Image (spheres, rainbow, N blue to C red):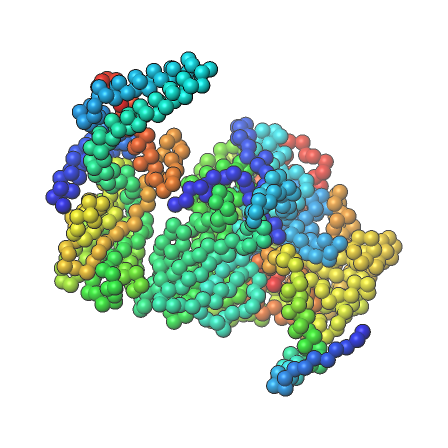
């Protein structure tokens, strides 16, 4: 074992495929609020739980605790955000505002100067000052990871009043904002490469190889003398002049006959049977002798023979030695790691990309997500047991992930519906709702008369059967012009767009931007009356468009940002937020600026349920053990509700109103 | 814009003709131009752009 | 050799017997103390105590000289030369006891590694069992079977690695206790011990080796394997034992395990503390 790794001289940040030194973090803070509060608030954030499905299964008596809670208190659909994407929706809840107040408008924002997509949630900058010694580049100043969400989080306000809070994996809080409260970041937390997750897949089956699959790297390998030698790529080594990719070599020994293999990597040596997952393995990417980046990953031996197939999960940040800030105080993640061992830290932990690309099949994906769920439930028991004052927020991702991937098996109209698979996995979504019922049972057991229990989701779910190529529609409608028409559909990132003749474009999942003069690098539309008119015209036409195949309207509502957002960041908003209809969503190609030929296409992927629609289509859920006094509560109403329970004056930035 | 001629051997040219049709290009020139552009773009594309694209693609919602 | 190992091992068993249930630090302090006593004893009787005392006085005197005459270049130079000379002499005086000590110390270290080097498995924990064959011997040709036991599950079929002449299994500890893994090789029965959830201080033998002086000297925990079988070693992988000091795990230093660092530091400190009481000149 190399224990030099354990030293943390500096923190390492990742940006644009690079590792860099961060200054010592101001996130390491002593303790958290001490006040004993008579009132307590327990919030269960169950991502993507849909009111319709919930109601159906409640009625059928499959969710007794949800039923009981609804009887005791209330159950009502919860108005979600515009657009109803998780980072936006959870930011509404965190800040009590809408995107105009917190500045998160989409998973993906864009840089108008470069017409280039950007992560909306966080920004990483490299060390500005470095010194070069031979081939080494040593950082002198700290780099930085910045949470791009604006507005204060409700637990920061609670902290002002010394009310303790534990916030477990709330989305849209990476890096966790500075607080003394116990928080750990969730969705938005990158893997060790700084990405949304890149798995590695090693196989001898060459026909499986696609040149470039999103979210994964495929490594062709050879089995020579029953042995495979390969490497796991790691972060770019910014300590070296030419910034090479770091990597860890490993060996796999396969039995000549039996379906077992031994994997030997750094100081680990373990045997896997075919179809078996390893436990978490801590690995260390060495940069320079005194510096390394620690990560955790799991191995899955999909097949030993005749073809060798080994899946390695995206390398998660090691919570015991976090290279990037994932918790406040820093030792909170360490404490959990010490008690439970390594756990998933990457934002959306289950590898939907591996399932989409047939690297994992349905059963294998579910096994992985079961590991996620088991970890979550274990930590929940622990947090629930020690919850005695203030607020506990607990988050579950599996509800969202399973609905995304398994909707095709409960929806016979879906292009990816498969009756055989439906028989086997058709109850996956129902099962996760039942799991949540069990989780709720534990929570209700703990809840006393002074505890307000809030069970909520950020949005519901809808089938995603047909995909809408928004940029193609813009092109066909004369708002977007290509340089070479024959190249259509072959380029990402609008590389084939003639900006001098383009009035509008779409980056991200619901965002439409006007190519505005003075804002966009080659903008042509004058701000003011010209732009206003254009925005209304496009919105109108979008809502009028009908899917030639079904006759339905793919766009239910096109929201004009100025009309629906309030707050200091409205100017940064996309000009139109496209609200898709039931069954429709933006296409796979559009968010990163690719322009296929068809306007509407079937969605034949396994990713078959979605929520990036119009908010009317997919409200979330709200169950409480108190009677709700308002008629149609929204996500941002929950924030002032929490503050009110603790008797805190509601800051004027908050646009929501208490629900009790 | 001036045009330059490039020599290709006949077998390859036949293949180019055949596949340009299959792939939906309107002429072999278009096909060759696109192939070359794609290769050059790979060499030219700055690392950071490529990296960002790869990283975003890990997001389940896009491909 | 096994007779010696067995007997020598029993001494440690006896020493540690009352402390098995306690924090391993208790056993560590005790054995460091006993080692310190042994070292003092060896020093006392195998070194020239009078000589050491004299040399040390000389060194002190010259050090004083160095300070007093620091303005005189020639005097201080001379003093330095003398300090160096007496230092050499001091080293030569202490060489003998060190030589006397070295062999018993190595034997002690090998034994202590069995007590402080490894953590027993806990029920539910998985590990690798490794059988290493003679070089060049194919693991596919050998007639070797592993018998099931109540103490652990054999979780995988044998994994045979020809290149390494090795056969591996994955085991999962099930019940507390010291269990026997039983192999049948060419009709002969062999056993290897596996320790599960023992007392905080317990003896763990990770490796069983073939009969040979050196092998057995280094791996004294179990009786040796017979020479007529093609098996070189049988090994169970145990986690390394941490030495935790007020919540801080003592790290490995340059490949030296934590227990060894603690042991050296403690026995040296205790040696110095008690040298006055036993009137030993070090």
**Residue in front for this viewpoint, C134 or A582:** C134
Residue sitting at x 32%, y 68%: A256
Report the front residue among C37 and A168: C37
| Residue drawn where x is 49% and y is 37% of the image | A331
Picture residue at 75% right of the left edge, 49% below the top? A572
Question: Given the current orientation, which residue lies at the most extreme right position?
Answer: A529
Left or right: A340 in relation to C12: right
Outermost residue to the front: C74
Q: Is residue B28 above or below residue A458?
A: below
How many numbered circles are shown? Answer: 0
Q: Quadrant of residue C58?
A: top left
Q: Foreground: A152 or A539?
A: A152
When the figure is inspected, residue A392 is found, relative to residue C238, above or below; the finding is: above
Q: Quadrant of residue C178?
A: top left
* Residue A633: % across, % down: 66, 46
Q: Visible in this render: residue A577?
A: no
Residue A176 is left or right of residue C277, and the answer is right
In this rendering, position of residue C121 left or right of residue A143: left
Kindly tell me whether residue C111 is visible in this rendering: yes
Which residue is painted at 20% across and 32% down in the image? C100
Residue lying furthest top: C68
Q: Split into 4 quadrants, where in the image is the C terminus of chain C?
A: top left
Quarter of the rendering occupied by the N terminus of chain C: top left
Looking at the image, residue A387 lies above or below residue A205: above
Q: Position of residue C5 (x, y in %)?
A: 16, 42
Residue A16 % position (x, y) = 62, 52
Considering depth in this image, is A274 or C109 the residue closer to the camera?
C109
In the rendered view, tell whether residue A295 sits above or below residue A229.
above
């Amino acid at each position: 074992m190399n224990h030099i790794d354990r030293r943390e001289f500096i923190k390492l940040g990742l940006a644009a495929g690079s590792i860099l030194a961060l200054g010592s973090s101001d996130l390491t803070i002593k303790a958290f609020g001490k006040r004993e509060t008579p009132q307590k608030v327990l919030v269960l954030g169950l991502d993507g739980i849909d009111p319709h499905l919930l109601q159906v299964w409640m009625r059928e008596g499959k969710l007794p605790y949800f039923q009981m809670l609804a009887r005791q208190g209330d159950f009502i659909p919860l108005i979600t955000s515009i657009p109803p994407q998780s980072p936006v929706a959870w930011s509404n809840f965190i800040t009590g505002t809408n995107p105009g107040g917190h500045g998160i408008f989409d998973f993906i924002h864009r840089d108008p100067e470069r017409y280039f997509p950007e992560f909306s949630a966080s920004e990483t900058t490299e060390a500005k000052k470095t010194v070069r010694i031979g081939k080494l580049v040593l950082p002198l100043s700290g780099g930085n990871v910045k949470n791009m969400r604006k507005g204060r989080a409700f637990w920061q306000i609670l902290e002002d009043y010394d009310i303790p809070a534990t916030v477990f994996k709330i989305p849209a809080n990476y890096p966790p904002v500075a607080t003394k409260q116990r928080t750990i970041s969730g969705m938005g937390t990158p893997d060790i490469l700084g990405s949304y997750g890149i798995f590695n897949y090693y196989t001898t089956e060459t026909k499986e190889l696609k040149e470039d699959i999103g979210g994964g790297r495929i490594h062709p390998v050879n089995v020579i003398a029953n042995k495979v030698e390969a490497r796991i790529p790691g972060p770019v080594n910014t300590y070296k002049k030419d910034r090479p990719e770091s990597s860890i070599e490993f060996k796999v020994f396969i039995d000549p006959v039996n379906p077992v293999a031994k994997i030997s990597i750094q100081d680990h040596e373990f045997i896997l049977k075919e179809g078996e997952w390893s436990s978490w393995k801590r690995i260390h990417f060495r940069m320079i002798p005194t510096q390394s980046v620690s990560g955790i990953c799991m191995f899955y031996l999909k097949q030993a023979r005749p073809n060798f197939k080994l899946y390695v999960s995206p390398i998660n940040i090691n919570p015991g030695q976090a290279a990037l800030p994932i918790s406040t105080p820093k030792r909170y993640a360490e404490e959990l790691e010490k008690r439970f061992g390594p756990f998933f830290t990457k934002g959306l932990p289950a590898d939907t990309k591996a399932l989409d690309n047939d690297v994992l099949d349905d059963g294998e994906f579910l096994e992985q997500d079961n590991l996620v769920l088991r970890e979550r439930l274990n930590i929940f028991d622990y947090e629930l047991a020690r919850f005695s004052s203030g607020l506990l927020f607990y988050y579950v991702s599996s509800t969202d992930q399973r609905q995304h991937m398994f909707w095709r098996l409960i929806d016979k109209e879906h292009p990816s519906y498969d009756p055989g698979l439906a028989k086997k996995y058709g109850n996956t979504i129902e099962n996760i709702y039942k799991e949540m019922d069990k989780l709720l049972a534990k929570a209700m057991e703990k809840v006393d008369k002074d505890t307000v229990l809030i069970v909520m989701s950020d949005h519901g779910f809808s089938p995603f059967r047909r995909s809408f190529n928004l940029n193609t529609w813009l092109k066909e409608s004369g708002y977007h012009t290509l340089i070479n028409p024959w190249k259509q559909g072959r380029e990402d990132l609008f590389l084939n767009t003639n900006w001098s003749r383009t009035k509008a474009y779409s980056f991200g999942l619901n965002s439409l931007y006007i190519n505005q003069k003075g804002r966009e690098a080659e903008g042509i539309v004058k701000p003011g009356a010209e732009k206003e008119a254009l925005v209304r015209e496009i919105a109108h036409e979008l809502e009028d468009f009908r899917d030639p195949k079904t006759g339905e309207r793919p766009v239910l509502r096109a929201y004009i940002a100025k009309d629906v957002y309030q707050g200091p960041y409205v100017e940064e908003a996309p000009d139109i937020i496209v609200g898709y209809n039931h069954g429709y969503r933006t296409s796979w190609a559009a968010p990163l600026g690719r322009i296929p030929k068809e306007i509407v296409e079937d969605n034949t992927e396994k990713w078959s349920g979605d929520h990036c629609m119009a908010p009317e289509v997919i409200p979330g859920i709200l169950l409480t053990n108190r009677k709700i006094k308002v008629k149609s509560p929204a996500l941002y109403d929950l924030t002032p509700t929490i503050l009110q329970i603790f008797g805190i004056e509601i800051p004027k930035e908050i646009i929501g109103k208490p629900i009790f | 814009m001036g045009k330059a001629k490039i020599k290709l051997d006949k077998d390859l040219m036949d293949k180019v003709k055949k596949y340009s049709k299959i792939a939906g290009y309107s002429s072999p020139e278009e096909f060759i131009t696109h192939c070359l552009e794609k290769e050059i773009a790979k060499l030219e594309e700055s690392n950071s752009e490529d990296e960002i694209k790869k990283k975003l693609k890990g997001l389940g919602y896009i491909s | 050799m096994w007779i010696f190992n067995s007997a020598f091992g029993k001494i440690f068993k006896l020493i540690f017997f009352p402390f098995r249930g306690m924090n391993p630090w208790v056993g560590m302090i005790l054995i460091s103390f006993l080692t310190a006593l042994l070292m003092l004893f060896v020093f006392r009787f195998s070194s020239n105590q009078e000589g050491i005392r004299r040399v040390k006085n000389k060194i002190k005197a010259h050090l004083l000289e160095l300070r007093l005459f620091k303005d005189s270049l020639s005097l201080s130079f001379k003093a330095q030369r003398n300090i160096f000379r007496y230092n050499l002499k001091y080293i030569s005086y202490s060489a003998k006891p060190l030589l006397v000590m070295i062999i018993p110390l190595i034997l002690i270290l090998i034994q202590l590694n069995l007590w402080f080097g490894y953590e027993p498995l806990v029920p539910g924990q998985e590990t690798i069992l490794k059988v290493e064959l003679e070089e060049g011997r194919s693991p596919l040709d050998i007639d070797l079977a592993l018998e099931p036991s109540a103490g652990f599950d054999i979780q995988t079929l044998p994994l045979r690695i020809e290149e390494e002449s090795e056969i591996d299994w994955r085991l999962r500890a099930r019940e507390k206790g010291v269990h026997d893994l039983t192999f049948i090789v060419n009709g002969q029965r062999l056993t290897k011990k596996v320790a599960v959830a023992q007392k905080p201080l317990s003896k763990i033998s990770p490796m069983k080796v073939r009969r040979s002086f050196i092998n057995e000297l280094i791996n004294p925990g179990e009786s040796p394997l017979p020479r007529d079988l093609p098996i070189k070693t049988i090994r169970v992988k145990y986690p390394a034992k941490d030495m935790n000091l007020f919540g801080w795990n003592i790290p490995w230093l340059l490949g030296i395990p934590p227990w060894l660092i603690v042991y050296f530091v403690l026995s040296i400190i205790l040696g110095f503390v008690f040298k006055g009481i036993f009137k030993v000149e070090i």
